[in-house]
Amino acid sequence: MKRIVIYTLLSICFSGFSQELHLPVFTQYLADNNFVLSPTFAGIGDNLRIRANGLTQWVGIKEAPQNQSLYADFRIGSRSGVGLSLYNDSNGNTFQTGAKFSFAHHIILDYYSKQYLSFGLSYNINNFKIDINKFNTTHEIPLIDPSITNNRSISNNNFDVGLLYRNKGFYLSFNAANMLPKTKDNYLGIEPSLVLNYQLYSGYVIKSSYNRNVEIEPSVYYQFFAGDKRSTTDINFKYRRYNSYDDYYWAGVSYRFLNDQPFKPLTVGPMAGFKKSNFYFGYSYQVTLNQIAAYNSGTHVITLGFDFLQGISDCPCTQSPVHD
């Protein structure tokens, strides 16, 4: 019974991250996949870039949240990019699927100092569903409500907008997700209509003065939810090492906390990956540091990637953001 109570409470607390018309953000964006966070990153690079993510949260707890997502973006012309995101998210008896269609435009602020500004826009379509076929009776609820005779679902449309500033190895991204209020249905009367959330992502790629093939990248990711004023921060650190063929491997660590409790982390965990030719692999593990830690073995995220259609940009504002 204690396990059920803890799981139920945490599901309620964390469902806002995964069931409010946006994907749950863990560490997918650190796996060579900044497009997860903002449409402004679409088209930065020399390839058609595809990244697939598989996420299993709270391993060891029955029907814990799971997520699968696919991202693809590529450059069009010399200064623009387009992208597509598809995802499927499940949390107990609730399921969410959706897609994002993104466009970004990149401009040069100063050619010699490598300062660039990017604008991004995404159109989002999302479907939320409750599967009644998985409803089970319990001691407290011996009968299922006979008025519930079919699955309940609702669809929503929304928009994201973003800005990205880059200056050599420094980057600062601002994104406003879900600009429009969410349509509510009567059977979900307690769900929030305001699902706007703001995201800041900033970091710096530092090249080693002793070895030109080594980079370190500290970064910070901040997310604020306008509906209930809660916010979180990730503090990240990555080490990246290239070889003579521009393949590389990397390793890092991420630390997430509620901003009113900075020394009580929600999660902390290592990550690692590599890129070999056109293939990319990344893995991250997060330990949950709260009451649920005794009932699960953590959260696992795997990223697989493929780069196609190699074509070096003739405009620096869309060239690869790392190892220039």
Image: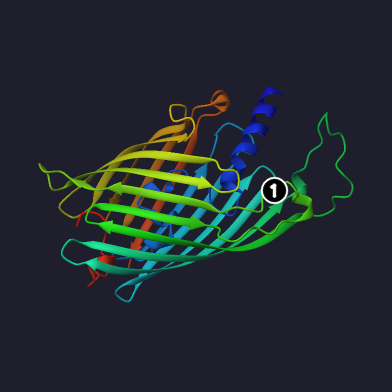
Residue farthest left in this picture:
210
Question: Vertical placement of 201 versus 118: above or below?
Answer: above
Residue occupying the point 54% across, 56% down: 87
Residues 40 and 53: in front is: 40
Circle 1 residues within 10 Å: few <14, some 14–19, many ≥20: some
Taking the image as drawn, is residue 25 in sight?
A: no
Q: Which residue is mark 1?
A: 191
Q: Is residue 86 left or right of residue 9?
A: left
Query: Which residue is at a point 84% across and 34% down the rendered structure image?
Result: 141
Secondary element at image label 1: loop
**Residue 267 falls left or right of residue 188:** left
| Residue 172 horizontal/vertical position (percent) | 34, 53
Position of the N terminus by quadrant: top right
- The answer to which image quadrant residue 125 occupies is bottom right
Residue 43 in view, yes or no = yes
In the rendering, at what x and y percent does residue 62 appear? 64, 35
Q: Residue at the spot x=34%, y=48% of the render?
A: 202
Quadrant location, the C terminus = bottom left
Report the side of 55 relative to 268 (left or right).
right
